[in-house]
Image: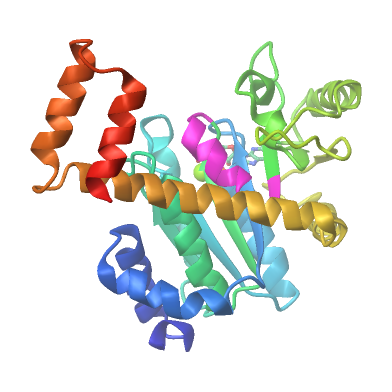
C-alpha cells in the first residue's frame, strides 16, 4: 500500500477516507490493521490555552533530535474558543514541512456524533501501521468525547497551566481521572510550582480515582513541570512517557488494550446499528416503534428488542 510505503500524499488521502468512513478506508484498514500495534499512542489533553500545541511542537523537536518519527492527530484545533491557535499551530509546524518523519493531521470533532473515537482510533491505526514511533493525539479537554479520545491512548497526559482561575481547571473538567501523567505547563509563570504542589497533594490523597472504565489506577500519576515555550522539562516528560510505557507492558496494559478494543468495537457497532435502523428499508418501522414508545403503547425494552430483531 502506497500509504505505508512512505508516500505522504497517499497517507493523507487514506486518512481523509478514514475520516469520511468510506468503504475504501474500511478495506484498507482491514489490510493494515495487523501491521499496527507497535507505536506508542500518547493522548494530550487539557484546558484551552494551557499550551498543548506548544508542548506538542516541543516534543516533536526533541524526538527529531533523537531520530525518532512522530505523527500528530490534532482533534478540532479550530474550536471557537481556540480559533487563534490554528494559525499559530500552522506557523509552528511549518518547520517540519519537508520532514518525512513528522506527520501532522487535524481531525474535526464536529460531524462525528459519537464516532469521534472510532474515527480517531482508525486514524491512529493507519499512522501506527505506517511506522511512526510515537503518535500524539491532542484534544482540548472540554468535551466528554474529546477527553475520551485522549484517554484511549496508551499514555494520557493532562496539561494544566498555573493561574487559570481560582480552581485548577483540570480538576474542574474532571480531567485528572484520565491522567497517567500530569503536566503543569508554563513553568516560567508565577504560581506554577504551587499549582504542581497542589495537584501532587490531591493526587496522593486520592490515588485510586478510576479511569472511568471501573479499573482502579495502580498508582498516583506523576506531576511534572514544563515550559513548552522554551522546551524546559520536555526531556523529563519524554522519560516519564517511556517509563509509563515500560511499566505498562504487563497485565494492566493488556487490560487497557482490551478496554480500548471494546470501546472501539462498541462505537462502530452502535454507529452501524443506528445507520441501519434509519436506512430506507427500516426507517418507517423504526419510526413507528419509537412513536409507540413515546405514546406509551410499547415499553422501551420491548422496543429495543424489536429494533434489534428488525435488522437481524
Ligand atoms: N509563558 C508561557 N507561555 C506558553 C507556554 N506554552 C504555551 N504558551 C502560550 O500559551 C498560549 C496557548 O498555547 P497553545 O499551545 O496554543 O495552547 P493549547 O492548549 O494548544 O490551546 P488550544 O489548542 O487553543 O486549546 C500561546 O500564546 C503560547 O505561546 C509556556 O511554557 N510559557
Ligand atoms: Mg492547541
Viewer-nearest residue: 148 or 256: 256
Q: Residue at x 44, y 80 (%)?
A: 31
Residue at horizontal 81 percent and vertical 49 percent from the top: 233
Vertical relation: 220 (above or below) 131: above
Percent across and percent down for residue 11 are: 40, 76
Depicted 166 relative to depicted 305: above or below = above
Please say whether residue 153 is one of the residues in the magenta stretch.
yes
User: Which is nearer the eye, 45 or 272?
Assistant: 272
- Pick the front one: 280 or 299: 299
Q: Residue 273: in sight, yes or no?
A: yes
Magenta stretch encompasses residue 194:
no
Report x, y in % for residue 205: 90, 20
Please report the residue visible at 23 percent of the width from the left and 10 percent of the height from the top. 296
Q: Which corner quadrant of the figure contains ligand 1?
A: top right
Rendered location of residue 120, percent (x, y): 46, 54
> Which image quarter holds the N terminus?
bottom left
Q: Classify residue 164 as left or right of residue 271.
A: right
The answer to whether residue 93 is left or right of residue 114 is right
Q: Is residue 87 visible?
A: no
Displayed quadrant of residue 238? bottom right
Choose between 253 and 280: the one closer to the eye. 280
Report the span colored magenta. 142-156
Amino acid at each position: 500500500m502506497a500509504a505505508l510505503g512512505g508516500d505522504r500524499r497517499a497517507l493523507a488521502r487514506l486518512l481523509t477516507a478514514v475520516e469520511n468512513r468510506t468503504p475504501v478506508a474500511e478495506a484498507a484498514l482491514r489490510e493494515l490493521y495487523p501491521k499496527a500495534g507497535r507505536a506508542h499512542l500518547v493522548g494530550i489533553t487539557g484546558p484551552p490555552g494551557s499550551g498543548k500545541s506548544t508542548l506538542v511542537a516541543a516534543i516533536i523537536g526533541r524526538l527529531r533530535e533523537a531520530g525518532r518519527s512522530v505523527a500528530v492527530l490534532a482533534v478540532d484545533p479550530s474550536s471557537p474558543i481556540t480559533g487563534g491557535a490554528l494559525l499559530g499551530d500552522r506557523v509552528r509546524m511549518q518547520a517540519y514541512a519537508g520532514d518525512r518523519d513528522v506527520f501532522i493531521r487535524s481531525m474535526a470533532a464536529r460531524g462525528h456524533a459519537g464516532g469521534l473515537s472510532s474515527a480517531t482510533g482508525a486514524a491512529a491505526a493507519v499512522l501506527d501501521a505506517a511506522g511512526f514511533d510515537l503518535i500524539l493525539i491532542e484534544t482540548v479537554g472540554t468535551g466528554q468525547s474529546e477527553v475520551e479520545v485522549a484517554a484511549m491512548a496508551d499514555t494520557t497526559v493532562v496539561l494544566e497551566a498555573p493561574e487559570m482561575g481560582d480552581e485548577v481547571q483540570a480538576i474542574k473538567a474532571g480531567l485528572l481521572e484520565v491522567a497517567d501523567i500530569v503536566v503543569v505547563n508554563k513553568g516560567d509563570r508565577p504560581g506554577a510550582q504551587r499549582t504542581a504542589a497542589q495537584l501532587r497533594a490531591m493526587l496522593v490523597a486520592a490515588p485510586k480515582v478510576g479511569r472511568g472504565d471501573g479499573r482502579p489506577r495502580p498508582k498516583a500519576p506523576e506531576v511534572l513541570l514544563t515550559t513548552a515555550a522554551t522546551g524546559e522539562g520536555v526531556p523529563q516528560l519524554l522519560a516519564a512517557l517511556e517509563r509509563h510505557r515500560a511499566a505498562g507492558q504487563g497485565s494492566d496494559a493488556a487490560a487497557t488494550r482490551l478496554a480500548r478494543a471494546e470501546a472501539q468495537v462498541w462505537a462502530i457497532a452502535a454507529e452501524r446499528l443506528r445507520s441501519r435502523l434509519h436506512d430506507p428499508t427500516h426507517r418507517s418501522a423504526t419510526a413507528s416503534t419509537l412513536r409507540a414508545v413515546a405514546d406509551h403503547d410499547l415499553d422501551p425494552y420491548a422496543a429495543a428488542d424489536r429494533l434489534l430483531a428488525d435488522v437481524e
